[in-house]
Image (spheres, helix red, strand yellow):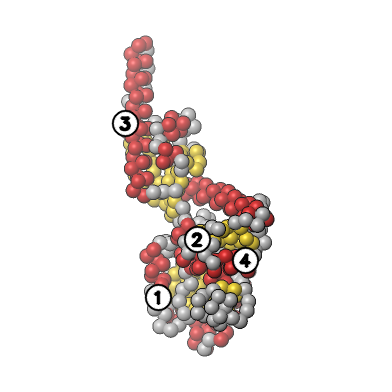
Amino acid sequence: MAELDGELLRRLAEWDTKGGPVSSFYMNVDGKWYPRKHELMVKGEDLTRELEQQAGSLDKTARASVARDCQRILEWLETLDRKGIRGIALFSSSRAKLWEELALSRPVRDRASVDERPQVLQLEALFETYESFCTVIVDREKARVFLAKMGRIEEQTDIFHDVPGQHDQGGWSQARYQRHIEDHVQQHLKDVCESLLRFFKRRRFDHLILAGPSELLPEFERYLHDYLKQRIAMRTTLSMTATAAEVLERSLAVEEAIEAERERYTVERLMAEAAAGRQGVIGLAPVLDALNDGRVDTLVIPNGPSREGRRCSQCGRLAVSGKNCSTCGGRLEPVLDVVESAVAVALRQRSRVETLTFNGNGAGGPTIPDLGALLRF
């Protein structure tokens, strides 16, 4: 299965389908939304029907290609192991014998589209906002460092220091030897912290998870540089023999907790700003107006169906409805999903895009009924 990175995005952009249609299929497969396999498949069937409907105006050969795409997508979905997976992105052009699949640790907006090329906007937004998690497992003798990003994990290094063993000799000699042992432990912790700082300067991870004996972690943390202390997301226990899969599972749980808290804060702030008439708006029309004026700091998108809208053929201004652009007078042309177009504009303006994972799925916390935006001014 492919990994989301710049190379993948370039490869998809360069697909040569020889004129054949491309089916792009995004789906939120988070167990919070679809706890049972049957519910997942029903949603998958709904989305593939959308693909076939969009292909209805194409020629017979193109329609047949999309039909084969849909069959392959459903067959793939039927065998999906959802462990550690919350979103999927599939791209298929059966006519050109092209296929790409991605399993993601973050959900995506349900979206199915037929076009001349893969629709990768959601992947671009994810790629720009994905955060990395560094986990360090430390004890009195060893340390292991892992880096997790985009649902993938890799052990980075193995730092080991010999610590003299305990012995049962009594008296002053035992006390002196015990101090010798503790000196070695302290030096080990300092060395691990220094190695971690050097690694951070090379890789610049976003969050740090500390794992080890509860009595040792405060001492270890004392030697951490402030840059690293500011990134501590969790303190936990993990065995020094933990597998990469176990570390990744813990990282994904922390990622989900951070994501939920960030969403809660964003939605609460948006609702307060919008209610006060300050730097927040809720609703498709006012959000599109703010985007058109370059005023959006954070575009906030609840999970939901596609929204039809309009785009000016001359200046690109987005609108909910109408025939002519209010800015330049150009013709407004229909777009199947104006939210997707809004995301593209937001990314070009260097705005943050926050797709709500938990909004409206029974997870608790505040929700918003429609598209929202926190404003720059």
Front-most of 116 and 167? 116
Q: In what element is the residue under mark 2?
A: loop
* Frontmost residue, 370 versus 202: 370
Q: Which badge, 1 or 4, comes first in the chain's sequence?
A: 1
Specify which label sits upstream in the sequence, 4 or 2: 4
Q: Secondary structure at mark 3?
A: loop
> If you read the primary sequence from the N terminus, does the residue marked by circle 2 or circle 1 appear first?
1
The amino acid type found where label 2 is placed reads: Ser
- At label 3, counting other C-alpha atoms closer than 10 Å, the crowd grade (few under 14, some 14-19, many 20 or more) is few
* Cβ atoms at labels 2 and 3 below 8 Å apart: no
| Mark 2 → mark 1, Cα distance in angstroms | 28 Å
Q: As displayed, is residue 312 above or below residue 250?
A: below
Task: Specify few, some or many for label 2: CA neighbours under 10 Å numbering under 14, 14-19, or 20 or more.
Answer: many
Q: Is residue 222 visible?
A: yes
Q: Are marks 1 and 4 in contact (CB under 8 Å)?
A: no
Please name the amino acid that badge 1 sits on. Answer: Trp
- Circle 4 residue: 286
